[in-house]
Image (cartoon, rainbow, N blue to C red):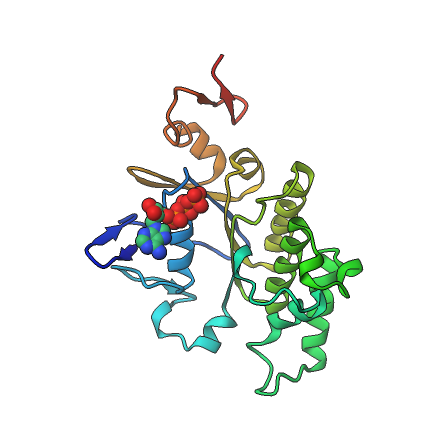
Amino acid sequence: MGYHTKKELNVVAADINLKLYEGELVGLVGANGIGKSTLLRTLSRVQPALHGNIHLAEKELTSYKPLELASKLSIVLTEQIASKNITVQELVALGRQPYTNWVGKMTEDDIDKVRKAIEVTHIEDLVTKRCFELSDGQLQKVLIARAIAQDTPFIMLDEPTTHLDVYHKAYILKLLKRLAFETKKTILFSTHEIDFAIQLCDKMIVMNKEGFEFGRPKELVQARAFSGLFPEDLIIFDHKSGRYKVRG
Ligand SMILES: Nc1ncnc2c1ncn2[C@@H]1O[C@H](COP(=O)(O)OP(=O)(O)OP(=O)(O)O)[C@@H](O)[C@H]1O
């Protein structure tokens, strides 16, 4: 995966080979610029893979029609929101767009899915607010609610916990964990919260300069996958606690 620029081909990562299952919360970690967003964008068909195949539910990703794809996968990008002038209720309801008819009329089922998404993310008190009135953390929850309303079996989120305080970071990640478990969705998110991801994820993808490692957090800790992520002059990964520590 990577980019065709005017002059050259910029290959960000190659030989990525992995399989995700339903009901799994999967954390994607790695240093700045290593290719996490590129991977999410490639998996969600926002940009084409340079080489290889991606299958979603046994079907080649490129063979999906846009609306069909929108009923199978959703991606949450914080910067993506087109108009912040709409209300929270309207933004969450946009998650139902792939299913509504051309006039956008919602059925009872659509309305129910929107209501449940608002309930599960605990944003009931925000529904009448306009999106520009929200704090970053509130907007993050609203965007997650929209993805839940979209009700796709596969949800991807690019850094869903940036801008959040430590309590709300844990809150969002626990919410994703519960969602994956209870609704049997596959949830893949990129994060810099490696400590939290180790504690909460079923599996993790660790991207590094050599390639990537994939597995259960405990196995990855044992395999020392987190040691080589950053230059070790400043921080080192402590295998006992599963955390990074600043060198004394
Ligand atoms: N539109 C683009 N065109 C060309 N190269 C790009 C483009 N977007 C990103 N890149 C390059 O691809 C590489 C990976 O970037 P990417 O945004 O995927 O990293 P990341 O792991 O998500 O980083 P961060 O943790 O800082 O968000 C970087 O070297 C970046 O410069």
The image position of residue 223, as x and y in percent, is 39, 30
Who's the residue at 68% across and 51% down the image?
135
Residue lying at the far left of the rendered structure? 7
Who's the residue at 52% across and 26% down the image?
243
The image position of residue 54, as x and y in percent, is 34, 62
Which image quarter holds the N terminus? Answer: bottom left
The image position of residue 11, as x and y in percent, is 25, 50
Left or right? Give the position of 223 relative to 134. left
Left or right? Give the position of 53 relative to 119. left
Asked whether residue 111 is in view, the answer is: yes
The image position of residue 209, as x and y in percent, is 30, 37
Asked whether residue 19 is in view, the answer is: no
Left or right? Give the position of 161 relative to 124. left
Q: Is residue 13 above or below residue 192?
A: below
Viewer-proximal residue among 48 and 56: 48
Who's the residue at 50% across and 39% down the image?
192
